[in-house]
Amino acid sequence: MPLLNFSALDLSALTWAYFYSEWAIRLIMIVVVPFRRTSEAARSWLLLVMFLPWPALALYLLIGRATYPRWRRRRFERLPTVLKLSADKILELTEVAREKLPRRFTRAAILIEKLGRLPVIEGAKAEFLADYARMVERLVADIEAAERHVHLLFYIFASDEVGQKVMEALGRARERGVTCRVLIDALGSRPWEREVRTTLLDYGVEVHLILPITFFRRKSARADLRNHRKIAVIDGQVAYAGSQNIIAADTLVDAGNQELMLRLEGPIVLELQAVFVADWFLETDEVLPVDSVMSSMPAAGTLTAQVLPSGPDYRVGGIESLIVTAVHSALQHVVIVTPYFVPSEPVQRAMQIAVLRGVEVHLVVPKVSDQKLVRFAQESYYTGLLAAGVKIHLFRDKFLHAKNVSIDIDLALIGSSNMDMRSFVLNSEVTVVIYDREIGLQLRRMQENYIANSDLLALDVWRRRLWIRKLAENLARLVSPLL
């Protein structure tokens, strides 16, 4: 009997200890969570903390702060010096063209310079590659023609038929004495990384994993902080950027992906080279000599362009700030194409204000979904946007993975960034900004083709969806700032 009384007392003490610990977590997190965090994200975290303190604490310790391991943060402290070497070389080899821009885009250009440290330059030539197979063919052909170096940085590098084509081209380039360097994201390429690395190393290619995840906490990167960029630079003369990975179109989604890549020539290539040089340094601690990877080149075209790198290493959400600034500059049309749309309050507000100013705002997203939770969170924003006058188009058939924005026909943004908090805060992304009416018109024609192959979402129809779906959307929206 005394033993039973002791057990009861012990259980009671544990119960009170657990109760007090929950309230201690709540009180501490009220102070900690809002620090350097958006109001939406803070609300989501605090809501989770209030209902589930211990699980919330465990999740917060795992992914609560968008910070890299200590070794990477120390390396990033030296990155400004590396970036300055590249930026100085670009200024030496090119001419800043910001003063020639239309006045309403000057703010965006200055913003990009402040955030990404890369200037507006002239002389670019751009080719849109919307056909999946065609893009792979062009990339392989450029690798086959390489004489000095090939630099690839991709979130996903698979060992399927597309990956094999690219790896074989790299192998042949190495046989010709071309230096080949490859960076692949450790999580995005995880199913194939062992085979890809083994094959490339056998070919003599220098290959490194970006942000590897290990069992050793000090060395391991957080699983949710990723390098989502897709960049290829060949001989410092030709570059690729956009949404397409090194993987077959239907490997991840049965319907197949619809992508958009840019093939660039001219001085703008130096800026994408600078992004690769910076990422190579962060992963290898090796500073590539800019004189050997950046050389003077004549203008290949007449385009004025700029590159914006963004990610957790930057204190301000670069791509989010650029999109907000660009939408506010629109006079007639805004078209946003993205596979994932979980906007921040400033982005959502900018779209709504644009409509009030008389601007047509179109959002094009895929009807096919590959992530249910994200899709429910995305759909939770539709009612407010439709009520404000934003036109939402659901692209049929393929998974629309392209990521681009057009402002009137004067400004085009093409890159790797989705319109969600993950791309705004957690992922390293890259966006090519082109200030040109001809390119803007080409992009608008492609966007109009997306719209022609989409279903227009009507507000009255959308409001009649099942209540269980509305419930799922509302629950998903509570955690949307964390997605």
Image (cartoon, rainbow, N blue to C red):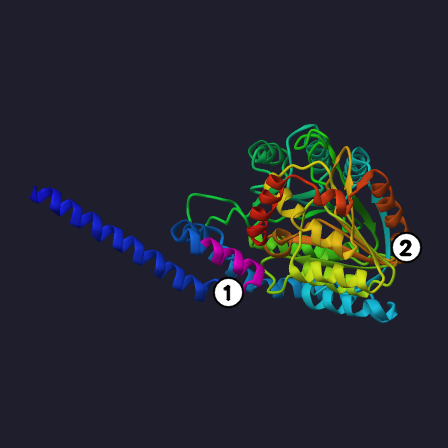
Graded by Cα atoms within 10 Å as few (under 14), some (14 to 19) or many (20 or more), the crowding at tag 2 reads some
Residue in the foreground of this view, choosing between 420 and 95: 420
Q: Which residue is mark 2?
A: 301
Label 2, label 1: how far apart the Cα atoms are: 47 Å
Vertical placement of residue 350 versus 242, above or below? below
Graded by Cα atoms within 10 Å as few (under 14), some (14 to 19) or many (20 or more), the crowding at tag 1 reads some
Q: Earlier in the sequence, mark 2 or mark 1?
A: 1
Instruction: Please say whether residue 240 is visible from this viewpoint.
Output: no
Residue in the foreground of this view, choosing between 325 and 230: 325
Vertical placement of residue 367 versus 112, above or below? above
Mark 2 or mark 1, which is nearer to you?
1
* Rendered residue at 61%/65% (across/down): 80
> x and y percent of residue 458 in the render?
78, 45
Q: Which residues, given as a range, are shown in magenta?
A: 35-48
Q: Amino acid at mark 2?
A: Gly
Disc on res. 100: none
> x and y percent of residue 131 in the render?
82, 36
* Principal secondary structure, stretch drawn in magenta: helix
Q: Is residue 43 magenta?
A: yes
Would you identify the image quadrant in which residue 102 lies?
A: bottom right
Q: Amino acid at mark 1?
A: Pro
Query: Label 1 near label 2: C-beta < 8 Å?
Result: no
Position of 205 with respect to 51 (left or right) is right
Vertical placement of residue 292 versus 247, above or below? below
* Rendered residue at 61%/62% (across/down): 314
Q: Which residue is mark 1?
A: 34
